[in-house]
Image (tube, grey):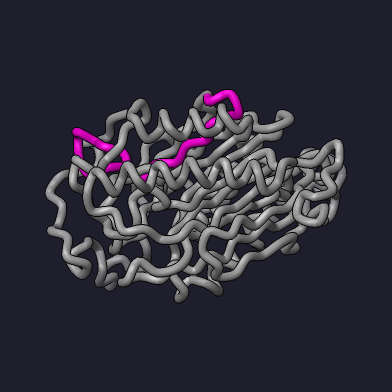
Amino acid sequence: MSGLGGLNKSSNGIVIGLVQLQLPVVDTPPQLAAQADKICAMVAKARRGMPSMDLVVFPEYSLHGLSMNIDPALMCRPDGPEVAAFAQACRANRIWGCFSIMELNPAGNPYNSGLIIDDAGELKLYYRKLHPWVPVEPWEPGNLGVPVCDGPKGAKIGLIICHDGMFPEMAREAAYKGSEIMLRTAGYTAPIRHAWKLSNQANAFSNLMVTASVCMCGTDGTFNSMGEAMICDFDGTVVVEGGGIPDEIVTAEVRPDLVREARAEWGVENNIYQLGHRGFVAVAGGARDCPYTFMRDLVAEKYRLPWENQVRVTDGTSCGFAPPKRLYREGHHG
């Protein structure tokens, strides 16, 4: 149920607005500042258009556009003026917000980062994209894990970014840390449309978790982002879907209390629980081991595919980036 997009908000409901923001062109600091102003104006629009809204979510690349420009003059900091403006917009409009920045990293390439700010303007969650969309994106792999915060009405909220959502382990990690609502911000273009829908629904169902996902929208004269905002309920059903209208804010009510109920009371298909309690009908408490070779190999830093030597694309040269010389741990800084 969507409560007619949040118009009929229940006492246990949280209304989320997903902004299909018009894809911008940002090549200069003045353009960056102007785009930050537009995002703040959209926060105010969200509050005016849906007074019941609790959380407004902006897509990945909403501030910087899709140029992949890593010019330090365009990069942001968590304590910089752009984030301060976003915090003031949330405070002034008494609404939570989720935002995207490309973060300056003196030790290497910039991070692709996401923030959740509460309705008092306080930073509640900071995340760096773990899985940049290789070979297209130049961003440093994130090093902050998958954080979860307490959101509106105490709901547990997680945030992942774009390509992260194609790895089931990302949604599982968010759920394992308690996330009841997982946000996924993206800049995807049309070729990813089918996989976008499948993964958003699968991430919801396999973790008994609401997923709320949104892409940039429209064209910048070179790329066309697809919009395609969608909210999926914890059983995988689609609650609401947007299309390709730039600057449309797609809204729905979600119910974290029903997520909690399902996680506590479902027997069949309570997969997030059953993963760590295999066959509990046969053995007390279920098997608690790790039967998965890939998990053990990841922990041991020995992950290697049987066809590893046949993989052709292993750096960003096909997209114009020079092969990196630095190993990950040389730049693994907080």
From this view, report whether residue 307 is shown above or below residue 73. Answer: below
Residue 175 in view in this figure = no
Would residue 209 appear left or right of 244 to someone viewing this image? right
Residue placed most toward the observer, 107 or 60: 60
Where does residue 276 sit, x and y in percent of width and height?
A: 67, 43
**Could you tell me which residue is drawn at 58 percent across and 47 percent down?**
183
From this view, report whether residue 191 is shown above or below residue 97. Answer: below
Where does residue 243 sit, x and y in percent of width and height?
A: 60, 69
Q: How many labels does the image show?
A: 0
Where does residue 175 sit, x and y in percent of width and height?
A: 63, 42
Where does residue 206 sit, x and y in percent of width and height?
A: 68, 55
Residue placed most toward the observer, 109 or 85: 85
Quadrant position of the N terminus in the picture: bottom right
Q: State the image quarter where residue 106 is shown.
A: top left
Residue placed most toward the observer, 86 or 215: 86
Q: What stretch is highlighted in magenta?
A: 103-121
Quadrant position of the C terminus in the picture: top left
**Could you tell me which residue is drawn at 59 percent across and 44 percent down?**
56
**Could you tell me which residue is drawn at 63 percent across and 40 percent down?**
55
From this view, report whether residue 151 is shown above or below residue 188. Answer: above
User: Is residue 73 part of the magenta span, yes or no?
Assistant: no
Residue 35 in view in this figure = yes
From this view, report whether residue 279 is shown above or below residue 151. Answer: below
Would residue 138 appear left or right of 321 to someone viewing this image? right
Q: State the image quarter where residue 326 is shown.
A: top left
